[in-house]
Each structure stands twice: as C-alpha cells, then as structure tokens.
Amino acid sequence: MALTKETYEALSDIVGEMNITDDPATLDAYSWQTENDVASLTREPFHFMRPAAVLLPGSAEEVQAIVRVCGSRGLKFKALSTGWTGLAQAFAPNELILDLRRMGRIVEIDAKNMYAVIEPYVTCAQLQAECMKLGLICHTIGAGGNTSVLASATSFLAGNGPDSMYQGYSGETLLGAEWVMPDGEIVRTGSCGFGCGWFCGEGPGPSVRGIFRGKGGAAGGMGVFTKCAVKLAAWPGPETLPVSGAPPAYRSYLPENFKFCTVVFPDWQRYADSIYKLADSEITYISHRQFGMLGEDLGPALFRVFSDSSKTLDDLEALVNDPETKALTDEVRHYSYQIILAGMTPGDLGYKERVLDEILKETGGHIVEAYATKEFQAYAFMYLLRLPYKHLNYVFGGKAQVFRPDGAPDFAIGAVDAMSAVLAKHQARGALPQTGGDSMMSALSGIGGGGDFHFEQFDLYDKADEKSVRAAWECVRDAMRNYGLQLQPGQHPKLDGLHGEELQEGILKYMAQPARLHWQWKMLEMMNPKGTAEAETYMKLQKNPESVDVS
Amino acid sequence: MALEDYRESMLGCSKCSYCKFIPLAKINGLKYAEGCPSVAYYGFHTYSGGGRLTAALSLLEGRSGYTDKVRDMVYGCQLCGACDVTCKVCRYNMEPQAALEEIRAVFAGDGQTLPVHDKTIENLRGENNMMSVPATGRGGWADGLGLKDISKERCDALFFAGCRCGFDESVKKVARAAAGVLKAGGLDLGIMGDGELCCGGAAYNLGYREDFARLAQANIAAWKDAGVKRIVTPCANCYWAFNRLYRQREDFGIEAFHAVQLADKLIKDGVLKPAKPMPVNAAYHDPCRLGRLGKPYEKWDGETTKIFGTIPKNDPPKPRYNGEGGVYDEPRDILKAIPGLKLVEMVRSREAAWCCGAGGGVREAFPGFGQATAKSRLEEAADAGADILVSACPLCERELADASAAKGGKLKVYDIFELLGTALGGGDF
C-alpha cells in the first residue's frame, strides 16, 4: 500500500531523500526471497506483499525516529541487514523495511576483554578478518561469512556453526545490545545499560537477552537492534590469511599449529559417541559435518569441482565415476565430519592430536587420507574457518531444508533413517537432483561445550523448473506429515499467505511447536502490544489453532 | 540473446548478498570488503547484482514499469563485473553480468536511455567517437612518433589508440608512451590516424547494440582491407571489445592484444631492458575489462543435457567467464622489472579489483558516483603503502587522476607505459 505524500516526506526528513524509496521495482527486490518459490509452488520467489517503502537509516536515532513515525501513523516496520532469510521481507500491509546497510561500523574491538561492539551490517567475514589482526576470532554461523553478526546474535534462529563447540552459538556469544523497542524507546542492555561498558550481557544493567532473543529470536518482532557486543575467542593463527588460487578454489595455507582432517566412523552410534568424546575433551576449534550437505553420492565429486578452478559442473559426471572419487565417496558416506584442531601453545596441538587419536581408537574411526593432501587442507582450512562459499547451498538452484528437533547426538541419529528415506524417495521421482538420501549438514554442537545437536537435511532442487520446486515442497510436506520431521523453526511460517490452506494443511499443522515459542509469543505481546514491529512470521505460528502443541 | 534468455539467472538469485562483496575468502577486514561500487554508493539492495536481476524480472513480468529511479538504477552501474565474479564462486548457472548488459539493451530498445548518453551516441553516429567531439584530429596523438599509416603501408601490427587516447588531452600521453615502448622493442606499428573508429564497446555497454554492431563490422572490414593480422591497444575497454564482444559476433581471424602483453614479452625476451631506477611503491589497479572481464570469448557449440535428475551438463564443457583468464600477471611483471620499483598489492586486486568508477557510462551520467568510487580506490592504494597508483587503461587513469586532483594530488596516478617508457630512458619520472 502506498504511503501518503505527507508520511513519505516525514520519513524522508529523517533519513534524507537518497535513503528512502517507494519505487515499485526497487520494492520488488525486497519482496524476493529464495524460499518464496517453495512456499508459493511457482518458479518465482516474489512475495505477494510489497513493502510500502524501504529506508536506509544511518543511526540508532534515525531508526528511533522512523519507529516513532510508524507508531503514530499506523505503520509497521521490520529491519534487516544482509537479509538472507525468508523472513527478511514484508508480511503486512503498510510495512516499512529498514535496510540497515548504512550501519556497518565496528564500534570497538576490546582485545583485552575479548569482545567486539558492532553495528548491524558488519558481516562475519569482516569481523573475523579484523579480529584476526588482534589474535582473536568471532563466531561465524553455519550460513556463512556473508551473514550479519548482529542479526544472528540478537534476532534470528539459533545461529550455530562450525566453531560452536568451541565458541557457542550466536545467542551465547551475545553480550549487550542497543535496542530500539517497538515503541521507539532505546534500551541498552547488560553492563552497557549501566554505563560501564559492554563486557557482560547479564548486567549490571537490564539483563533481557532471554526476553528479546530467547533460543530462536523474534526475527524482527521485538524491534530493531542497532548495536551489539559479541564475545570473541582466541585465534592462534596469523594476523591475515594470505589467499591464493583462482575462483572458486581460493585457498590459504594450514599454519603449523593447526590440523585439518576429515574423520569417519563405522556406524551412526560410534559417530554419535565420538561427538560426546570431542565435547568432553574440548579439543576441537572447528567441528562440522560440512561436506555432507551436497549428498552422499555427489558430495566428494562436487568438492573436487569446487577446489579446482579448472573444473565445473560439466565435469561432475566424470568425477562421480572416477574410481578414486568413487572410493572416497564410499569411504566418507554417512559417518564422517570435519575437524580443525588449533594449538594454542607449542605442546598443545600435539596433545590434541593424541587425544583425537585416542578417540578414534575408542570409536573405530580413522582419518580420511584423500582429504589430507596439503592442497586440500589449504582449501578446507579457509572453507571451514570463514565459510566463504556457502552460497554453494544453491549450486543446483534452490535449497529447502528439513531437520529434526535439536537434541543429544544419540537422539538425533535416531532420525537419520527417516531423513534419508524421505529425501531418497522424492529424489527417485526424478524432479530433484539425485544427490543421495543423506544430504545432511550439521554443526557438531548447537551450543558451546557440546550437547545440543541436529542434522539439517538439504532438500536441493532446481529453481528454474517448476516441477522441481513442487517436488522440493512435497518432500518437505512428506517429511513433516508422514515422517514426523521438523522444519526449521521460523523458516517458513506465514509464507502461508502465498497459498494459504495448502501450506497450513501441509506443514504448519504438523509442525512441532516447542514450549519456547509460546513463551516468546507472550514476550512479544508484552513488548510489542500494538504490533508496530511486524511479527507476522515466527510468532504467528502459535496462533494457529490446529497446531500440534507438544509443549 | 534476449532478456528472457537470462530468466534462469534472475530466478536463480538466492539473495545471499555475495554480489555486494569481494570473494569472501579475500576479505581482509572491514574496509575494502565491498565489491560492488553501486550498492556501496546508493545503498539499496536493488543496486546490487542480485537486486538488479530481481528488479529486471519484475519489469519483465510486468509487476513494475519504467520510472526515473529504475533508469538510474540500471545506468548507475559501471558494469564492472565484480558481482559476476563473486556470484560465480560456487554458482555455475548464473550469468549476472551478461544479464545486466542485456537489461540495458532492453532499455535502449524501449527508448529508456539517459539524455546524456543519447547525446554521446548521437555524436558517435556522426563522428565515430564516444568523446562528443568531431572526428578530425583523432590521430594527432601520434604526431612525430614515426608510426606508419596502415592504409598506405603494411606493418606487423595495428596500434589502436581508442577514443579516449585519441581525444582526451590528458591521456594522449598514454598512447604515445605505449606506442613508443613497443616501437623501441622493435615492433613495426601502424595506425589508422583520423580514420580510426570507436571500438563500440562503450555503446554496447550503454545498450545501443546496433551502434556497436555497425562499428564492429566497420572496424573488422577496415582491418581486413588493410591486411591487419595483429592489433595492439593501450586501452582496456578496446581490448575487451575486440576479444570478448567482436569474437562473440564472429571469428574475425585477427589477434588482439593489450600493449602490456606485448611489452611484457619484449622484456622477458630481453629486448626491452628497463634500467632507470624508480624508487617508489606502486600499486597496480586492475582495469575491469582487462582483468576480470578480459578473458577472450571462446565459441561454444554444444548440447545441454540433465544428469543426476536435474543437474545441467554441457557437452563439450562450456567456457566459463568468472574472472579467471584475465590479463593480471603481465602488468605486474612489467612493474617488477623496473629497478627500484616496489609493487604493493591492494586488498581488492585481480578479479576482486575495485572499479575506477568511470565505466558503463557512469563518468558521463553520474559523475559524483564515479568520483566517489575512484576516491575509495585512491584510499585503498594509500592504505596499501603506495606512493603512486598505476593502471593500464586511459579511462581508469583519467577517472582516478581526477579524483586524485580533487583530493590534493598527493597520490599520483600513472599509466603503466608512462613508467615503463621512463624506465627505458624516456625522460624523468
């Protein structure tokens, strides 16, 4: 719905004429999310709802002023940073999108106290590179180095990644935040709220991290976070990572005090056992099932493509049939993951290697030699550390995702057969890339220190083919309806507006709804009583009367 | 090709924002992580590679129509190719650069061009240059160099100066220096003088495909008439036009080089010996159309089938244009061959280079944007420890030099042949 001239001018006065637009084509670019195609069952991921305008605020004060205009004129708002999620779009009429890309400053890196204060548009890759110069590193979420540190820390999903066993997930790394609430009040949380710096999220000062973020984040429904502080960890590597090679096969080098390896186990049980042991021993710097996501049948061949700039998808078939790759594919099938060990002192790496050897002995695991070449280590080190290639999730065009509820590794492996079966069944129908039933990725822990675990099954499809889009959706629906598997919380709901009943019937009704969502809904109602901060997505799920309440 | 042919690229955008940055592996901090000048300046997602694809699809689908803002969005872009490189890191069926070029052709076809570009093209149609000046005097840059007139005498190679070197007084020295160096290396060069026509590359970039086609056809015919076997140019845009665009139209059977390629070989063969010391830290700026867009076109005539269900496979393998195969090493090797000169690398180098700001018609239509882009490049060079910034394209040199002058001229901008010419004994540095 178009803004009135008066409202447009009031907003323009806040951000400046250059930083507001209601041009239809521009708005459409903000109505585009890759998930929309699966939700709408068409090839075209335009959402039916266009924002009324997009603004580029440059400061918390500008955000505050915009929010107040929204409150006084019956508008809604939602903020986004890099915006790589289905929820980063307008879902309500009269909604403003605040694109926070002008707020991309690193306010401070306190090396002594090991935290960074950042604005919304600082990406994981940028902050990581700055931190490395000081012997520190930040948490990078599994979605990759292109994502906003703040968005994940304050607002959206769990945010775990390859470093989570060592560093924790985004909610854990969050310290204080500068928060423009839905009514426009600016609150500074944690120790920052008491005027004594950003070092602690729990106070002195208001400790409201659990309220505004909880486990999964309100994805915009709680207002706008304009700054936050995140914990940093030790980086025992070089100040900068030299990069060589041609795209996409960029590589750095494996410093002497690091070790990269892919390890493989005889079965799921011993796979799970190894994860507990890694958590108990606290030896890993990076631990992730990263190479599994492109499929048990195609993954190893695809990583040969990605790590060699002379290769393309045109070489895939030959590589899959190459005897060496075939042997590797069989070797790493199902029960493998990647590890990086980091030596913090001269003796530390040796100690960690010995512990790993012991764990492998106890679990019947071994290190995969084919991935131990110097060249591949140099590639994989950069890959796992920064996740700079994660749009390879879309190497075949599209990606939907299915995974089971979080739990201990023992619990999660109980779902792998169902996850593989449902994907294999739908791949066999011919409209999906036949990657193999196990196309699962996972951090080895969803929380710092280990314990929380899940698999993410990659339901890859071809966006350019409507049959493939539909097949991906049918796979998701089948996974939830007939196999009891859960869709990523907060990933798709309210996309139901696109085709209402079918999605409602097919997905939401069968979606597990943990108790935490109910609590967050109550928080939302308190903090955002007028609904000025648009919350039509994540939380709305709780209002579905047909939902299965598993709390 | 038509815009419809790029529908798959439009649909394929995953909105990951990679197109806004340099390849993430190359990021070295907060500064200089941006890869796309346009979204860095204008801010809205729509000004990124992915955003433009989506906006174009919106237009194609009739969801939105032409507006002034849409025109500004389409033309407020240097078509520098940075988004194309980063998108194609691990994406194999995306062609953002080609789609963005096609969008302009659609705009031009629908009369949705900018008045400033229309004027330039109007002049091009009469005077065969993009500098909005009469054709006479185009060959004046070569006065006194003793180069052959190719319409009268046969020679080893045609030296093609390009419009910028032909008419822009501040960069005529680039053509003189390049031709002088190659001549000193024993190359038998000829020129077309006032008869040289625009390469047409800029017209292509603005979307005026018919004007490009006319010039390509006329140039190829003139070269064939004159028995030209090799062309050498000091201009990155001309190099790109000949090797990428002309070859896409037809296999015209004439080799086309940038002058740095020949000069580098002459140095490596021991023919040219830069001896004069230049104790200076120099950063090399990769021109977009010599670097990441510089891979020559390779004809592909094959079939696309599906493997493993839905994965496209091209047989034979399709050539890929992802920033590899550009002219990156030759200019660096030339600079390294100059005694005393220390080459320093900027964060954004080679296929990840930041654009100078001038290309794609931005210098003419959005000078403020162009200069902001150039200033960012100067800062980056200074931060890399450079005393001077060197390029291999007269358009880059002009844009960067203007920005340098506006900033007080502390960091000087040179063309690589100005330095090489001096190192070979051609005057003071």
Image: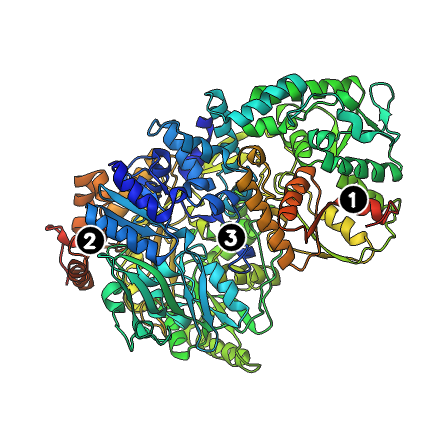
CB-based contact (under 8 Å), mark 3 and mark 1: no
What residue does disc 3 label? A303
Q: Quadrant of the C terminus of chain A?
A: bottom left
Which numbered disc, 3 or 1, marks the residue closer to the eye?
A: 1
Amino acid under disc 1: Glu
Q: Label 1 neighbourhood size at 10 Å, few (<14), some (14-19), many (20+)?
A: many
Q: Is residue A464 above or below residue A151?
A: above
* Residue B19 in sight: no
Identify the mark at residue B367; answer none if there is no mark.
Answer: none
What residue does disc 2 label? A511
Amino acid under disc 2: Met
Looking at the rendered structure, the secondary structure element under dot 2 is loop
Q: Is residue A149 above or below residue A491?
A: below
Q: Residue furthest left?
A: A545
In this picture, residue B325 sits left or right of residue A362: right
Looking at the rendered structure, the secondary structure element under dot 1 is helix
Question: Is label 1 on the same chain as label 2?
Answer: no
What residue does disc 1 label? B418
